[in-house]
Image: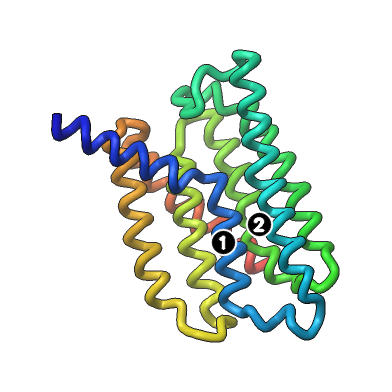
């Protein structure tokens, strides 16, 4: 009974920290880290940017996956089998790339603010390639990428992000534990996810 409750908690954590949410949370953190950057250029740009991220990184991919469920191209939202992830990966990747291009070319939005989205694109396509051979924890890819974004933008933030970074690191560990408790991934798949998440954002910010 206790283990069942623990699994229910782990499932709730997995839903709350769904990978598709991470680009939006990262973009919000980028904006909050330096909220005055839009004041002198284009105050409305931040709202267009957040709306675009929500539409292209969450709404459209979610609709595509629901459509695949309806057409029985995938059996569950969890997509426990690697082969089931192929079509969702492709559809989501197309929306991610388009979303990144839109934000990158928005008037009044600094180029560096689109870097977390580029990192999400890189992570997604790397995960897609790895998924051909073995499973990888996309939840851990997303959380590790989110933590890395916080670390990388700390230098341009108007205040220290250290408390939030520490909290995000703890949450990253909780998410990995939740995926393990649910038997969704092995420890190696979880750790591999962390590595891919970190490297994808480091590469994106280096380009």
Q: How many marks?
A: 2
Q: Nearer the viewer, residue 118 or 28?
A: 28
Give SS at disc 2.
helix
- Whether label 2 touches label 1, CB < 8 Å: yes
Residue 66 at what x, y percent from top left?
62, 26
Q: Quadrant of the N terminus?
A: top left
Q: Is residue 202 above or below residue 58?
A: below
Q: Quadrant of the C terminus?
A: bottom right
**Which quarter of the figure has residue 152?**
bottom right
Residue furthest left in the image: 1
Q: CA distance from mark 2 to mark 1?
A: 8 Å
Circle 2 packing at 10 Å, graded few (<14), some (14-19), many (20+), is many
Give me the residue at 50% from left, 69% from top. Answer: 150
Q: Nearer the viewer, residue 17 or 90?
A: 17
Q: Would you say residue 193 is visible in this rendering? A: no
* Residue plotted at (66% across, 41% down): 59
Which mark's residue is nearer the viewer, 2 or 1? 1
Give the SS element for disc 1. helix
Q: Position of residue 193 (x, y in %)?
A: 44, 46
Q: Residue at x 48, y 42 (%)?
A: 138
Residue at image mark 2? 117
Location of residue 12 with respect to 134 vertically, above or below: below
Label whose residue precedes the other's in the sequence (2 or 1) = 1
Side (left or right) of 124 relative to 111: left
Instruction: From this view, report whether residue 6 is shown above or below residue 34.
Output: above
Q: Is residue 133 visible?
A: yes
The structure residue drawn at horizontal position 36% and vertical position 40%, both measured from the top left corner, is 12
Residue 87, image x, y percentages:
64, 26
- Does 131 appear above or below 32? above
> Which dot marks residue 194?
none
Residue located beneath label 1 in the image: 26
């Amino acid at each position: 009974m206790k283990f069942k409750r623990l699994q229910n908690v782990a499932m709730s954590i997995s839903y709350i920290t769904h990978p598709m949410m991470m680009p939006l949370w990262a973009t919000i953190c980028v904006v909050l880290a330096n909220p005055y950057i839009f004041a002198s250029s284009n105050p409305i740009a931040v709202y267009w940017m957040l709306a675009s991220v929500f539409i292209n990184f969450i709404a459209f991919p979610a609709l595509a996956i629901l459509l695949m469920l309806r057409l029985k191209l995938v059996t569950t939202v969890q997509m426990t089998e690697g082969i089931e992830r192929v079509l969702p990966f492709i559809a989501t990747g197309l929306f991610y790339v388009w979303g990144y291009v839109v934000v990158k070319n928005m008037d009044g939005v600094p180029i560096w603010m689109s870097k977390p989205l580029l990192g999400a694109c890189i992570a997604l396509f790397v995960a897609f390639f790895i998924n051909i051979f073995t499973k990888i924890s996309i939840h851990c890819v997303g959380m590790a990428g989110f933590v890395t974004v916080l670390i990388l933008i700390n230098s341009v933030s108007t205040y220290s992000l250290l408390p939030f970074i520490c909290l995000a690191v703890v949450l990253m560990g909780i998410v990995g534990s939740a995926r393990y408790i649910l038997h969704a991934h092995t420890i190696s798949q979880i750790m591999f996810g962390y590595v891919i998440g970190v490297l994808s954002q480091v590469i994106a910010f280096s380009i």
